[in-house]
């Protein structure tokens, strides 16, 4: 794999003048404004017989501005300035006109288009030339690379209690302060790359270089990122390079009139489950397109890194369809692995690490491909983190299938710690996947219909609500502290957002009722959502203070099946969880370790899920001091009584 990667890198150096020049193509391809006011256009359309540019600027004459054919399927066009001014004004609508091999004229949006919009009375998007007289100027430097990542997974369009598509401006001024207050230091933005179908959750991309216009302008997004940086918040883009929308009128599909171009032709070029097109990662121009795409998002918008979606689909020719992964190494090496796609991921991470070493990359891979998060120089994939995708599945299985008294402490600990500790994992109890219609969030699984009637503090605390609130907090804390080297939460789930997430579509009469986040619920003192919100905030603030995510793995000293107790140490803290449905304990001995035997170590409670401000029963005295004794317990040299 490293040999394949190295050969690609060597070819880029020899034929393209280096990785820097090769990945700057976003500044020359598409339609670009020149310093003298002229316009330079460039496209890759290997299957085209001829290429033209049409639009408002030439009265939509499809033949007045022909491109010149270059080598390797490239085409270029230079339009001189008119009296020192651009011949294509800002805001003009454009189309690339392709004469296909069968003679048909195809009106296409450039794959490199920076801004596309859809009028309310139209189905398809229009390409709009974006060249404002004064673009947004970033005022704040990007944050330094974080040691502990606490990620708030977000979707701009649903980030409002109102039933509508929310805006970049709304996120900037109403949501970013909330994220900061909750103690998250990183926001991961979904559905930013333009997608024609809103209900695709941003995973059916039509314009890869365009920020979604349904939330506002490119400058609005730049301002949003700049404000996040002023708060010390790192901003990651959920990037989709695993597949593309089948749209041809306003997407990449059949751009030059052929079945291939950016994609494999025939069966290999189609994803059977997603009904989308699959990139040909062995193609030189596809590599140019995708690598340049990453660089554009970093340099133009100042994103601080990426979460790569659908990595499992990229890594294997079977795309993970109907395939289980047990951890056997034969599953990761062989002819079923798409080495071209893996080489692209190595190139992408190498480029990012070389040109922008402060940036972070995350792999969404369910298969557990070994070394995916090891440096490229070691033959690894080069990612910084991977998602610990088994953890949310385990919590769902436990809550759905087991009675409380049957919870297996050893199995919970195994799931939370079963990872290659030389690779960094992002732990999460639930993400957007669990919030979607057809699934249930943890809060909804725990409390279900009673969330509609019994979340008021004026109502008696029912057993269902009591159990749900307590387990919601405990599940999040043990996942946060034991499950990885980073933590992720999907917006709204921190306070147990009621109901599911469903975008407007024909099946729900185009309703926005479930395509929103009711942040207002946490601001109502009469509702119990405030308790979960406060616990999530204080949990993050405690990690910020002690940095357990950046600390070595935890030492688990106890997994007691009868007592339903889990105890472990990490970052100088002792974490103790009592999952027993009805049994509390007095004078419970917990093992611990400290380096000095001459000083009596004193412990105090820092975070207590049973505290009143978190909706607990206040059974513990926070003024109590706990002293460590030289009394071995559970293979630890010292212990405390709690």
Image: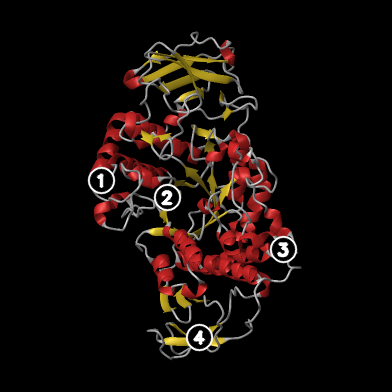
Residue of label 4: 601
Quadrant of res 256: top left
Residue of label 3: 527
Which comes sooner in the sequence, label 3 or label 4? 3
Q: Tell me whether the residue at label 2 lies in contact with that at label 1, contact meaning CB atoms closer than 8 angstroms.
A: no
Residue of label 1: 1
The kind of secondary structure element at disc 4 is loop
Residue of label 2: 364
Which comes sooner in the sequence, label 4 or label 2? 2
Q: Is residue 120 above or below residue 192?
A: above
Q: Mark on residue 73?
A: none
Q: Is residue 259 above or below residue 320?
A: above
Q: Which residue lies at the image location 51% right of the left edge and 57% below the top edge? A: 430
Compared across the picture, whether 289 is left or right of 430 comes to left
The kind of secondary structure element at disc 3 is loop
Q: Nearer the viewer, mark 4 or mark 2?
A: 2
């Amino acid at each position: 794999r490293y040999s394949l990667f190295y050969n690609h890198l060597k070819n880029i150096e020899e034929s393209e003048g280096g990785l820097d020049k090769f990945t700057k193509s976003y500044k020359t391809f598409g339609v670009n404004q020149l310093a003298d006011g002229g316009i330079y256009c460039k496209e890759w359309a290997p299957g085209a017989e001829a290429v033209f540019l049409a639009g408002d600027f030439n009265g939509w004459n499809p033949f007045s501005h022909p491109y010149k054919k270059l080598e390797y399927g490239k085409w270029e066009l230079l339009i001189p300035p008119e009296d020192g001014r651009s011949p294509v004004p800002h805001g003009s609508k454009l189309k690339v006109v392709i004469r296909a091999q069968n003679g048909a004229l195809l009106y296409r949006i450039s794959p490199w288009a920076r801004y596309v919009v859809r009028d309310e009375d139209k189905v398809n998007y229009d390409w709009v030339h974006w060249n404002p007289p004064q673009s947004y100027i970033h005022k704040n430097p990007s944050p330094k690379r974080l040691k502990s990542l606490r990620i708030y997974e977000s979707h701009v369009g649903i980030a409002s209690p109102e039933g509508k598509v929310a805006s970049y401006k709304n996120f900037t001024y109403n949501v970013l302060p909330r994220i900061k207050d909750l103690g998250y230091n990183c926001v991961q933005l979904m559905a930013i790359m333009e997608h024609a179908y809103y209900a695709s959750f941003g995973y059916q991309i039509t314009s890869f270089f365009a920020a979604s216009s349904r939330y506002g302008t490119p400058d609005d997004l730049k301002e949003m990122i700049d404000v996040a940086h002023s708060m010390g918040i790192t901003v990651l883009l959920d990037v989709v390079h695993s597949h593309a929308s089948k749209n041809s009128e306003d997407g990449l599909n059949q751009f030059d009139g052929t079945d291939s171009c950016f994609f494999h032709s025939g069966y290999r070029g189609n994803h059977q489950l997603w009904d989308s097109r699959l990139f040909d990662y062995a193609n030189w121009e596809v590599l140019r397109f995708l690598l340049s795409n990453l660089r554009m998002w970093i340099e133009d918008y100042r994103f601080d890194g990426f979460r790569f979606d659908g990595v499992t689909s990229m890594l294997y020719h079977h795309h993970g369809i109907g395939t289980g992964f047990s951890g056997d190494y034969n599953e990761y090496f062989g002819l079923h692995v798409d080495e071209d796609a893996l080489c692209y991921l190595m190139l992408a991470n190498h480029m990012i690490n070389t040109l922008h070493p402060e940036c972070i990359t995350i792999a969404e891979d369910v298969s557990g491909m070994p070394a995916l998060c090891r440096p490229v120089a070691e033959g690894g994939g080069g990612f910084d983190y991977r998602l610990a995708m088994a953890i949310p599945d385990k919590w769902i299985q436990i809550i759905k299938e087991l009675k409380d008294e049957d919870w297996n402490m050893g199995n919970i600990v195994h799931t939370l710690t079963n990872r290659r500790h030389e690779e960094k994992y992002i732990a999460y109890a639930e993400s957007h996947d669990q919030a979607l219609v057809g699934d249930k969030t943890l809060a909804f699984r725990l409390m279900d219909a009673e969330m509609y009637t019994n979340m008021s503090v004026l109502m008696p605390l029912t057993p269902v609500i009591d159990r749900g609130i307590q387990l919601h907090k405990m599940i999040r804390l043990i996942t946060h502290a034991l499950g990885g080297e980073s933590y992720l939460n999907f917006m709204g789930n921190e306070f147990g957002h009621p109901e599911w997430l469903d975008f407007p579509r024909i099946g729900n009469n185009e309703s926005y009722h479930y395509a929103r986040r009711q942040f207002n619920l946490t601001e109502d003192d009469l509702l119990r959502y405030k308790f979960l919100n406060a616990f999530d905030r204080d949990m993050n603030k405690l990690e910020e203070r002690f940095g357990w995510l950046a600390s070595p793995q935890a030492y688990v000293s106890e997994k007691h099946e009868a007592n339903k107790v889990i105890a472990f140490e990490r970052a100088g803290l002792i974490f103790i969880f009592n999952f027993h449905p009805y049994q509390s304990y007095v004078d419970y001995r917990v093992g611990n370790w400290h380096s000095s035997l001459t000083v009596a170590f004193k412990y105090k409670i820092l975070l207590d899920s049973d505290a009143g401000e978190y909706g607990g029963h206040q059974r513990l005295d926070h003024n109590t001091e706990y002293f460590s004794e030289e009394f071995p317990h559970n293979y630890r040299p010292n212990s405390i009584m709690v």
